[in-house]
Image (cartoon, rainbow, N blue to C red):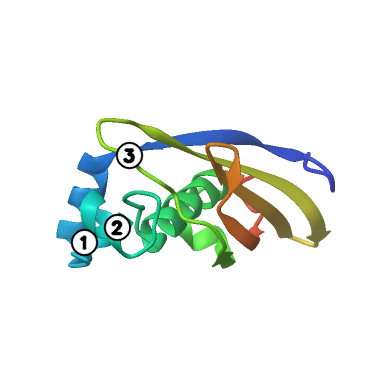
């Protein structure tokens, strides 16, 4: 049984430059801030950063996996507040957690937290899922 206040098990995703390149190729987003350290620094970033939509997609996967499939996800939203910084030849974490904040019939509302290197990267992250398979 799921109750208000319950924590969803934490999931850690790992991002590296190979994943950023694969995402750039799949999405068509070849912005050099996601691939060139020199360019990223030249525009004021600390290093290459992950695509925001890749970050959202991974958090969405966390919600979808917990909910038992995408058909059970009724709402999902967040704001980008900090980038996920991905230095060369390193894997960085994207750590996702959630807490059940409301239950209305078969709908469960979650507050989500996504961090990388201990820094919160998404704000106002929320989801609403159908509880049929939970």
Q: Residue at x 64, y 61 (%)?
A: 123
Q: Identify the residue at the far left of this view.
A: 25
The reply to whether discs 2 and 1 touch (Cβ–Cβ < 8 Å) is yes
Crowding at mark 3 (Cα within 10 Å: few <14, some 14-19, many 20+): some
**Residue 3, position as x, y percentages in the image:** 83, 44
Real-space CA distance between mark 2 and mark 1, rounded to the nearest whole angstrom: 7 Å
The answer to which of 67 and 121 lies nearer the viewer is 121
Q: Nearer the viewer, residue 106 or 29?
A: 29
Residue found at x 46% / y 58%: 56
Disc 3 from disc 1: Cα separation: 14 Å
In the displayed structure, 88 sits above or below 46; it is: above
Please name the residue that numbered disc 1 is placed on: 32
Q: Position of residue 14 (x, y in %)?
A: 39, 35
**Would you say the residues marked 3 and 1 are in contact, meaning their CB atoms lie under 8 Å apart?**
no
Q: Secondary structure at mark 3?
A: loop
Q: Quadrant of the C terminus?
A: top right
Q: Which residue is mark 3?
A: 87
Left or right placement of residue 126 versus residue 18 in this view: right
Horizontal and vertical percent for residue 118? Answer: 59, 38
Q: Earlier in the sequence, mark 3 or mark 1?
A: 1
Within 10 Å of disc 1 (Cα), the crowding (few <14, some 14-19, many 20+) is some
Q: Are marks 3 and 2 in contact (CB under 8 Å)?
A: no
Numbered label attached to residue 40: 2
Quarter of the picture holding the N terminus: top right
User: Relative to the observer, which residue lies in front, 31 or 36?
Assistant: 36
Residue 127 visible within the image: no
70 above or below 116?
below
């Amino acid at each position: 049984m799921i109750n208000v206040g319950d924590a969803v098990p934490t999931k850690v995703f790992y991002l590296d430059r190979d994943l950023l390149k694969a995402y750039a190729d799949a999405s068509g987003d070849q912005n050099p801030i996601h691939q060139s350290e020199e360019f990223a620094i030249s525009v004021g970033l600390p290093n290459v950063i992950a695509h925001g939509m890749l970050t959202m997609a991974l958090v969405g996967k966390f919600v979808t996996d917990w909910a038992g499939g995408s058909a059970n996800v009724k709402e999902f939203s967040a704001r980008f507040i900090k980038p996920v910084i991905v230095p060369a030849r390193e894997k960085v974490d994207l750590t996702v957690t959630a807490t059940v904040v409301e239950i209305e019939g078969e709908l469960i509302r979650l507050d989500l937290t996504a961090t990388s290197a201990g820094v919160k990267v998404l704000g106002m992250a929320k989801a609403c899922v159908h509880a049929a398979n939970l």
